[in-house]
Image (cartoon, rainbow, N blue to C red):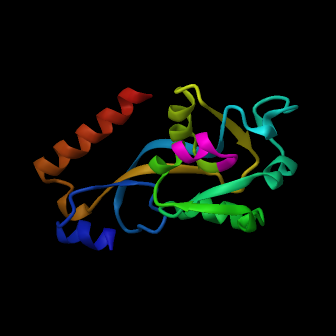
Amino acid sequence: EIADALDRGTLDIAIGFLPGVTGTQQEVLLSDHYAVLLRKEHPVLKGLVGPQLSHKHLRRLDYVAVRSHSETLRILRTLDLQQRVRLSAAHFMAVPTIVRQTDLAVIMPAEIAETFERQGEYVMLQADLPQSAFDVSLHWSWRFAQEPANQWLRALVGGVFRRRR
């Protein structure tokens, strides 16, 4: 529906990790990967050497799944960990309080996890997660690519992400 809305002009741009959106013009805004977020005092951290979780550690964790991000569910299924999901949340922004107050882990984009980790109550760990790298892109329709307002909006969004790097 996103590509059609862009072509109809009901959407000017779309931003995100949108693997199902095809036939659009696009620019990669940032590249990220999935990581695991835990509360700082999580029991699995005892005896852990380095910031890397092994498959053994991943199998010992219970998870909160994020419904709005199907890739994290795919990762849990690929690792045969779907039976370890104890709670489902609507969005990543609902997760910090849950993780801080429980022993649940969450697989989430590292960029978001780093933001939570800076608060001091969380630990972000790397793990060998299948197909964990992804790109967040800016999408637009070729039909409106030459319109000044669309060019301005794309330049503005692209500039915001270039300044972050």
Res. 140 image quadrant: bottom left
In the image, 24: left or right of 101? left
- Residue at the image position 84 percent from the left and 45 percent from the top: 54
- Residue at the image position 32 percent from the left and 39 percent from the top: 158
Point out the stretch of residues depicted in magenta.
97-105
164 in relation to 13, above or below: above
- Residue at the image position 53 percent from the left and 42 percent from the top: 96
Furthest residue in direction left, as rendered: 148
113 in relation to 73, above or below: above
Q: Quadrant of the C terminus?
A: top left
Give the image location of residue 40, x and y in percent. 67, 32
**In the rendered picture of this protein, how many numbered marks are placed on residues?**
0
Does the magenta run of residues contain 15? no
- Residue at the image position 52 percent from the left and 43 percent from the top: 97
Q: In the image shown, does 23 or 3 lie closer to the viewer?
A: 3
1 in relation to 68, above or below: below
Q: Quadrant of the N terminus?
A: bottom left
Give the image location of residue 27, x and y in percent. 38, 48
Give the image location of residue 157, x and y in percent. 28, 41
Q: In the image shown, does 139 or 51 lie closer to the viewer?
A: 51
Q: In the image shown, does 5 or 91 lie closer to the viewer?
A: 91
Give the image location of residue 121, x and y in percent. 59, 30
